[in-house]
Amino acid sequence: IDRELEAAEFYRNMAKQAKRDATIAMFHDLEKMALIKAFEFSYELGWKTLKDYLNEAGFVVASPKETIRQAFQAQYIGNVEVWMDAIEKRNESSHAYEGEILDTTTNFIVNQFYPAAMKMYNDFKAKIKK
């Protein structure tokens, strides 16, 4: 449980940092790149945290897609589409930092991923306290 609480708090802090970055009214390319880096880290930590919880519960999962599908079935996350889209955005963003990819990924992070990540954090925090 201590490891789970520590991971949850670390994840919350990363998500809060991403939210702070997301509140900037006008993003410049450098700020978008920083937000995307925070997203990449938060996404990786998020799916790996889900994987750890699923493994602890007796599920056998390995890949991000497999983990996210099983986490949805086990009701660890609510919006599987956002998490699946996050896989695609993560892969896209790790290869390009210009133009449309910056804009679409930034919009996705602010409007879809951040709310889903915070919901996951709050749900896990509630489960841990039980």
Image (cartoon, rainbow, N blue to C red):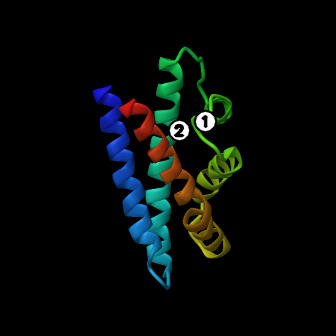
Vertical relation: 94 (above or below) 98 = above
Amino acid type for the residue under numbered disc 2: Trp
- Determine contact: label 2, label 1, CB under 8 Å: yes
Amino acid type for the residue under numbered disc 1: Pro
Q: Which residue is mark 2?
A: 47
Find residue 14 and report its horizontal and vertical position in percent: 38, 54
Which mark, by number, is residue 104? none
Other-residue count near label 1 (Cα within 10 Å), few / some / many at <14 / 14–19 / ≥20: some
Circle 2: element type: helix
The picture quadrant where one finds residue 73 is top right
- Image quarter where the N terminus lies is top left
Using the numbered discs, state the Cα–Cα distance from disc 2 to disc 1 in whole angstroms: 6 Å
Name the residue at 40% across, 40% down.
125
On the picture, is 95 further left or further right than 37? Answer: right
- Image quarter where the C terminus lies is top left
Circle 1: element type: helix
Q: Earlier in the sequence, mark 2 or mark 1?
A: 2
Vertical relation: 42 (above or below) 47 = below
Q: Which residue is mark 1?
A: 64
Find residue 105 and report its horizontal and vertical position in percent: 61, 65
Name the residue at 59% across, 52% down.
90
Find residue 86 and report its horizontal and vertical position in percent: 62, 51
The picture quadrant where one finds residue 74 is top right
Find residue 75 and report its horizontal and vertical position in percent: 62, 33
